[in-house]
Image (cartoon, helix red, strand yellow):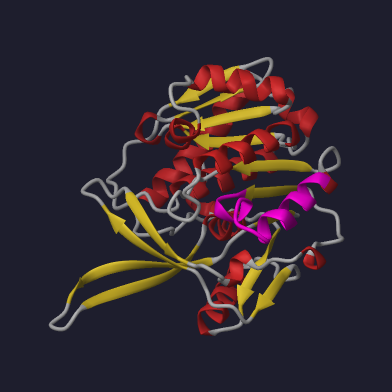
Amino acid sequence: MFLVCGEALMDVFAVGDTATGMTLDARVGGSPFNVAVGLARLAQPVAFFGAVSTGFLGERLVRALQSEGVSLAHVARSDAPTTLGLVGLDEKGVPSYAFYGDGAADRQLQPEALPTTAFQALHFGSYTTVAEPTATTLRTLVQREHGKTLISYDPNVRLNVEPDVARWRAHLQWMLPRTDLLKISDEDLGLLMPGRTIESFAAEALAQGVKLAVVTRGSAGAQAWTAQATAGVPTPKVAVVDTVGAGDTFQAALLTWLAEHGSVSSAALAGLSAARLSDALAFAVRAAAITCSRRGADMPRRAELAP
């Protein structure tokens, strides 16, 4: 079973103006929440580890996880409110976010909630990795499981939650020697390490101990590196509605491909051939393209990705 760790929140889209204001469309979301749902839809056993509000929005998040088949065994409940992420889309469907979440439930995950059961792999990402006290709790879990369980990490930088780029950069550097599978977007890489090429960053990540480094490049596709092989694939052509959840879908699909091909271990990642890397990336970008063809983080199910 996979364990996905981090935030669950409500993404709020502006639908249109009314006579006295605006119509808003609130949808369940959050990067780790999306990865967990994406894994479940791709027929992978998965649990979510995070703090969720006991309020009505939190109840909706819990029902959504439950209906998708995500285990709630490691969900902590809090009477703090649910984070709201206001989503604006540009003419290409690329989202920008404004988060309202100071003191919200997803930032209140305490060490006593840490799971004690074993998992096939752990995935971490986005702003709860740098927002306290949840960040300390997640780092404790990484430290405990490093070397015993496959660690997956996607920084998924959100500067409007934590504007200090140095904090994000420091956490990335802390994670590199503790991460087996690193996925980062070229946009995030540009924020954290301006001027660095993706090739030089991948080389650094591998030197630090990462077994598989993946850089997603939006419409330009994705590239991957191990110490022995490299591969790249283009992005499939699709009519883009928006790109909300595309990176999370990619992550869930990549983990799914690895699970389906017996490669969820450090040694298996390091041993992937260029052909296998290409197959894994192709599966992941195809899944992400399906999400981009639909509004919001509406991730595909396994049957939609049949050969």
Rendered residue at 37%/56% (across/down): 97
The outermost residue toward the left is 19
141 inside magenta stretch: yes
134 w.r.t. 256: above or below = below
Which percent across, then down, holds residue 148? 86, 41
293 w.r.t. 112: above or below = above
Which percent across, then down, holds residue 59? 57, 81
Residue 113: image quadrant is bottom right
* 151 with respect to 276 (left or right): right
208 inside magenta stretch: no
Rendered residue at 40%/48% (across/down): 290
Q: Closest to the observer: 89 or 220?
A: 89
73 w.r.t. 264: above or below = below
Which percent across, then down, holds residue 208? 71, 24
* 267 with respect to 30 (left or right): right
Which percent across, then down, holds residue 29? 49, 63
Q: Closest to the observer: 272 or 13?
A: 13
Q: Which SS does the magenta portion mostly show?
A: helix
Rendered residue at 48%/45% (across/down): 247
Rendered residue at 56%/65% (across/down): 8
Which image quarter is the N terminus in?
bottom right
Q: Closest to the observer: 173 or 15?
A: 173
Q: Closest to the observer: 169 or 3?
A: 169
Which region of the structure is painted magenta? 125-143
* Number of on-image labels: 0
Residue 191: image quadrant is top left
* 17 with respect to 244 (left or right): left
